[in-house]
Amino acid sequence: MDMTRTHIHELTHKRLVIIVIAHENEQVLAAQVENIHYFNPEAGILLYNGGHNPDFGKNVNIWSFPHSHPLKAGIIAPAMWEIMNWLEELGAGYEYLMSLDHDVLFVKHGFQPFLDEIMAESDSMGWRLENNRDHDFSLPVRNMKNEWHLWQPVFRTDGFLTYFNPGQVYRHDIVRRMLAHVDHASVNHLLSISEAVALEEVFFVTLAMACGGRVREYPEGTKYNDMVRWGENITFESVQQHRDHPYFYWIHPVKGDKLLEMNQQLLPKPEPMASVPPAPHLAVPRRKRIKCKKLLKRAFPRRRVKRRKIKFGLHSRNKTKKLT
């Protein structure tokens, strides 16, 4: 759905803006958007089209970031960074900005009140918060180490942090400070040449920390589990088992056809239409029946047909005998 002035005005007044980064399979995107709308009816949803098809997403009920462009495989950090800048230029009044991949579904209502409670004293939140000193074996840490000499002058820190992507959430206040902390020309150049896969898992949380932001992880989000993890699809059995957990609101990963199937299982099934009972037969009072009959007689008078009368008296019988 293309952005118009009305759409932009509506988006800029949402408290929670959810970015969906995707590039293929509109059917899956439509199901994901339907899911987000159902469980977060007050949120604004913004598509970043990271593929080569400029028409991707136009048939889906979702706002589309007008400056989307193809992203490198495994490096989606430019998407959120560009949207952060764009929303600031628009004067958006959001309170929370969240980034999702194409393989995430929500499983229950109440995510925004959950953010209000859990992030009351925090500026950012993500899954599995780690640092480069204690977790130097992880993929994003290893990749960033290869480019740290380029990025260290941007952050101006001695080390860096990582969040597991997706599901990172940033308050608007810290986003403003992040945008003001860096030289944008340098950041844009580094984002365009970086080969650090999973850069988005390092860049944003480290920049938030560099600005003095209060970073935290999701409650009980220190490790992979049956609702948020890397690898195999989440099963519906796991969702049924853990959906009532107070800290689990979304799942990752669930991909392709499995996402379509899961979405149908999560959303309420439409109730069958009730059969309409036949109209009751109302007895017509006798006076009305008589009146109706009179009206019908006037409207459709009966034609009188002259009939030949045959007499079966004695004289007739005698005539019959003579004939025989």
Image (cartoon, rainbow, N blue to C red):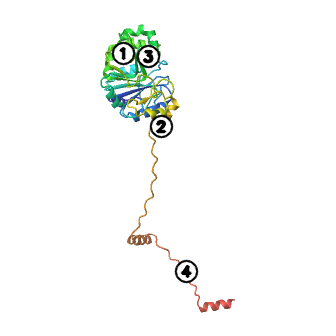
Mark 4 vs mark 1: in front: 1
Residue type, mark 1 in image: Leu
Q: Is residue 194 visible to us here?
A: no
First-in-chain label (3 vs 2): 3
Q: Residue beneath label 4, please?
A: 307
Find the distance from the CA under tag 3 to the CA under tag 2: 34 Å
Residue at figure coordinates x 37%, y 15% from the top left: 206
Find the distance from the CA under tag 1 to the CA under tag 3: 12 Å
Find the distance from the CA under tag 2 to the CA under tag 1: 39 Å
Residue type, mark 4 in image: Arg
Q: Residue beneath label 1, please?
A: 207
Residue 199 - label: 3
Residue 232 x %, y %: 51, 26
Q: Are marks 3 and 2 in contact (CB under 8 Å)?
A: no
Q: Residue beneath label 2, please?
A: 265
First-in-chain label (3 vs 4): 3
Q: Quadrant of the C terminus?
A: bottom right
Q: Are marks 4 and 1 in contact (CB under 8 Å)?
A: no
How many numbered circles are shown?
Answer: 4
Q: Secondary structure at mark 4?
A: loop
Crowd rating for badge 3 (residues with CA inside 10 Å; few <14, some 14–19, many 20+): many
Find the distance from the CA under tag 4 to the CA under tag 1: 110 Å
Q: Quadrant of the N terminus?
A: top left
Residue 172 x %, y %: 32, 23
First-in-chain label (2 vs 1): 1
In front here: 203 or 222?
Answer: 222
Q: Secondary structure at mark 1?
A: helix
